[in-house]
């Protein structure tokens, strides 16, 4: 059975993520669909798309913490 993740509701996708949290490929595919539905104005880069995820995510978090102070 092939699932069409793009046709699932957000609630269904979240349930799918919960049920498949230990399956890397299934989890990544569902998470990408869910993240692509976010409001573009609030969008942060998806870590898998970054050239150097550890450094770039750390920089994003530091900036967020700085803004919160």
Image (tube, rainbow, N blue to C red):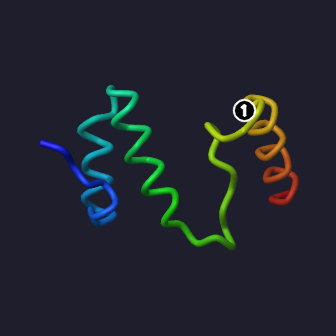
Q: Does residue 13 appear left or right of residue 47 in this picture?
A: left
Q: Does residue 61 appear left or right of residue 9 in this picture?
A: right
> What residue is disc 1 on?
53
Counting labels gives: 1
Residue ID at (38%, 47%): 30
Q: Where is residue 55 in the image (x, y as percent from the top left)?
A: 81, 31
Q: Position of residue 25 (x, y in %)?
A: 38, 31
Q: Where is residue 27 in the image (x, y as percent from the top left)?
A: 37, 37
Above or below residue 48? Residue 37 is: below
How many C-alpha atoms fall within 10 Å of the one at disc 1: few (<14), some, or many (≥20)?
A: some
Residue ID at (61%, 37%): 48
Q: Quadrant of the N terminus?
A: top left
Kindly indicate the quadrant of the structure image that contains residue 6: bottom left
Residue ID at (33%, 26%): 22
Residue ID at (66%, 62%): 43
Q: Quadrant of the C terminus?
A: bottom right
Kindly indicate the quadrant of the structure image that contains residue 7: bottom left
Kindly indicate the quadrant of the structure image that contains residue 57: top right
Residue with the most extreme front position: 2
Q: Position of residue 13 (x, y in %)?
A: 31, 55
- Closer-to-camera residue (56/32): 32
Q: Does residue 29 appear left or right of residue 49 in this picture?
A: left
Q: Does residue 27 appear left or right of residue 39 in this picture?
A: left
Above or below residue 5? Residue 48 is: above
- Closer-to-camera residue (62/54): 54
- Closer-to-camera residue (18/62): 18
- Closer-to-camera residue (62/9): 9
Q: Is mark 1 on a helix, strand or loop?
A: helix
């Amino acid at each position: 059975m092939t699932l069409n993740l793009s046709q699932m509701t957000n609630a269904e996708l979240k349930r799918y993520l919960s049920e498949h949290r230990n399956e890397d490929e299934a989890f990544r595919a569902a998470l990408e669909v869910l993240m692509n539905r976010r409001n573009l104005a609030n969008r942060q880069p998806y870590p898998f798309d970054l050239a150097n995820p550890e450094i770039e995510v750390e920089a994003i978090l530091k900036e967020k913490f700085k803004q919160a102070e």
